[in-house]
């Protein structure tokens, strides 16, 4: 089926033995229904297919047979970009109309987890009731050696129908983030959670800040904290929402909390209510 999808989720790239480097991509169709598009090797797309967040795309999709999560669809044809990203003018009016106003905004995390365990959903917009903190932890600085070895073997094996430059580009690997960024919060019933942020934007922000600070990691981390905690939360100028998504492994295992943060929505407060 061919659908128009507004892209709202682009995760930081991860490695897959089967598909090399992957980006979790998701969005909503014109009816506000969630679609997770898989697999997407984003950095290997040509320039005519590299979508941005809050940009409409049109793509042929079919329901995934290997991923039982209800929103997961496989790309079955070409991907076409439709215009540019929706602008943020007028307190995100166009983004609200196309996305925020069409999806349910959840406040009870227990109910969300129960729905995930019942395979009723695996993507949702969530509004924390109380923000508790923003945490940064050091993690492994290199990708899993076994996955890298598989990719390197495939790269060396080559492809008779592709030139060496094309093969090298397909197996290029993005740098792994050396830090894990997480939000701590309470839901409306007082349930406390700490969830990792896997949004593309927080990874890109870290690397940009690292370059601007002349490779000073602590300064880069400080700048990320200022953006995601001071600006998005502490200033109270935004109604910051989270897009939560389950990972396939923990969704299938029905883990106590299968969700991670796959998107952060720094929604500006509307200046005044509209008359119409």
Image (spheres, rainbow, N blue to C red):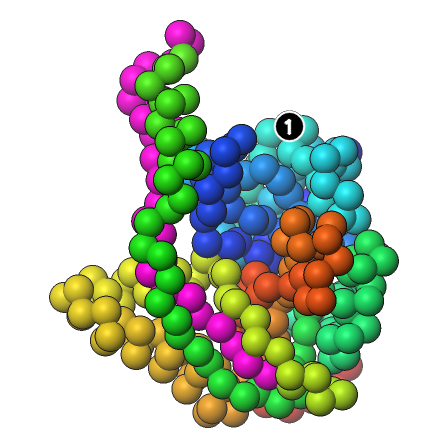
Is residue 179 found inside the magenta-colored segment of the image? yes
Image height of 247 relative to 154, above or below:
below
Q: Residue at the spot x=80%, y=60% of the render?
A: 117
Q: Position of residue 209 (x, y in %)?
A: 26, 68
Q: Nearer the viewer, residue 211 or 276?
A: 211
Q: Nearer the viewer, residue 245 or 166?
A: 245
Q: Residue at the spot x=54%, y=84% of the render?
A: 238
Image height of 91 relative to 160, above or below:
below
Q: Residue at the spot x=52%, y=77% of the render?
A: 183
Q: Position of residue 210 (x, y in %)?
A: 23, 65
Mark 1 lies on a secondary structure that is strand
Q: Position of residue 4 (x, y in %)?
A: 69, 45
Furthest residue to the top?
A: 160
Locate the N terminus and report the quarter of the image it occupies: top right
Q: Residue at the spot x=52%, y=67% of the render?
A: 196
- Magenta span covers which residues? 160-185
Q: Which residue is mark 1?
A: 77
Left or right relative to 51: residue 251: right
Image height of 171 relative to 53, above or below:
above
């Amino acid at each position: 089926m061919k659908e128009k999808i507004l892209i709202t989720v682009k995760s930081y790239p991860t490695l897959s033995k089967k598909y090399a480097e992957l980006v979790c991509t998701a969005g909503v169709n014109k009816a506000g229904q969630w679609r997770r598009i898989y697999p997407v090797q984003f950095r290997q797309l040509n320039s005519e297919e590299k979508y941005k967040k809050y940009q409409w795309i049109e793509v042929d999709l079919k329901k995934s047979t290997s991923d039982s999560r209800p929103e997961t669809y496989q790309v079955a044809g070409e991907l076409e970009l439709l215009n540019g990203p929706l602008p943020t003018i007028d307190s995100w009016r166009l983004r609200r109309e196309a996305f925020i106003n069409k999806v349910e905004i959840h406040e009870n995390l227990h109910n969300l987890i129960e729905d995930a365990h019942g395979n009723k959903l695996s993507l949702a917009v969530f509004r924390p009731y109380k923000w508790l903190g923003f945490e940064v932890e050091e993690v492994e600085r290199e990708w899993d050696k076994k996955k890298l070895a598989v990719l390197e073997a495939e790269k060396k094996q080559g492809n008779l129908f592709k030139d060496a430059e094309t093969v090298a580009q397909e197996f290029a690997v993005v740098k792994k983030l050396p830090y894990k960024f997480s939000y701590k919060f309470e839901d409306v019933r007082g349930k406390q959670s700490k969830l990792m942020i896997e949004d593309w934007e927080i990874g890109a922000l870290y690397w940009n800040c690292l370059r601007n600070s002349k490779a000073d990691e602590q300064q880069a981390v400080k700048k990320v904290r200022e953006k995601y905690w001071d600006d998005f939360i502490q200033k109270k100028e935004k109604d910051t929402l989270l897009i939560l998504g389950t990972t396939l492994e923990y969704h299938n295992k029905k883990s106590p909390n299968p969700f991670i943060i796959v998107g952060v929505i720094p929604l500006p407060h509307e200046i005044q209510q509209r008359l119409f």
